[in-house]
Amino acid sequence: MRKLCVLERDLFFALTNQVQDTAHYLDLDTGAVIPVFDFNRNEILTMVQDNPERYIRLVPQSFRQGMEMMERFIATVSREDLRARLRQAIKTGRAFSQFRQVLGDYPGEMKRWQQFRRMMLVEPLKEKLRQRDIELVLVSEPEPGSVQ
């Protein structure tokens, strides 16, 4: 199985980016996360169309998927009082920020949430890559000698 090193921060930005009229592709040769904006859209889309096996579109999570992820996390919380606060937080109009605000009072649970969220966001991509005999390796900093 071939390893593909991808910058963690770029991948998670692409998987959570909700900015309208933007997209991201993962280059399966280099591990680069390629953003698509108005100014480079034609160039990038032509590049992807010319070599479709080399690129995978990184689809950001939807609002519904984000809500489901928070609900799944809440089910793992052992403290009943915290579970109740988190359930109440996601019922508001600002569910994501309220959820994070509640977790801000519980640093250990915040860290656990961040790990849970990362795992949930990246697992579908890992599976897609495994089907292509590629192992996703997340790196926190650019590899020495790589160009960013």
Image: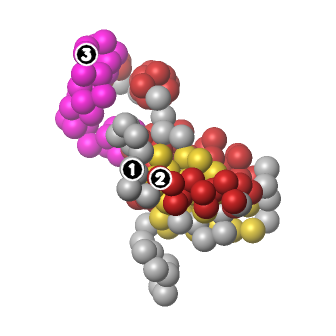
Q: Residues within 10 Å of mark 3 (few under 14, many from 20)?
A: few
Looking at the image, is 124 positioned above or below residue 146?
Answer: above
Point out the frontmost of discs 3 and 2.
2
Q: Are marks 2 and 1 in contact (CB under 8 Å)?
A: yes
- Mark 2, residue position: 41
Q: For the point 27% across and 33% down, which residue is it?
A: 100
Quarter that holds the C terminus: bottom left
Q: Dot 2 lies on which element?
A: helix
- The magenta stretch spans which residues? 85-113
Going by the numbered disc 2, the residue's amino acid type is: Arg
Q: Residue 12, position in %: x, y?
A: 44, 50
Looking at the image, is 135 positioned above or below residue 63?
Answer: below
Going by the numbered disc 3, the residue's amino acid type is: Gly
- Mark 1, residue position: 38
Q: For the point 38% across and 56% down, which residue is it?
A: 39
Sequence-wise, the earlier of marks 3 and 2 is 2
Sequence-wise, the earlier of marks 3 and 1 is 1
Give how far apart the Cα atoms at labels 3 and 2 are.
33 Å
* Quarter occupied by residue 114: top left
* Residue sitting at the far bottom: 145
Quarter that holds the N terminus: bottom right
Going by the numbered disc 1, the residue's amino acid type is: Asp
Whether residue 48 sits left or right of residue 89 in the image: it is: right
- Mark 3, residue position: 93
Q: Residue 35, position in %: x, y?
A: 45, 56
Q: Dot 1 lies on which element?
A: loop
* Residue 97 lies in the magenta stretch: yes
Looking at the image, is 14 positioned above or below residue 71?
Answer: below
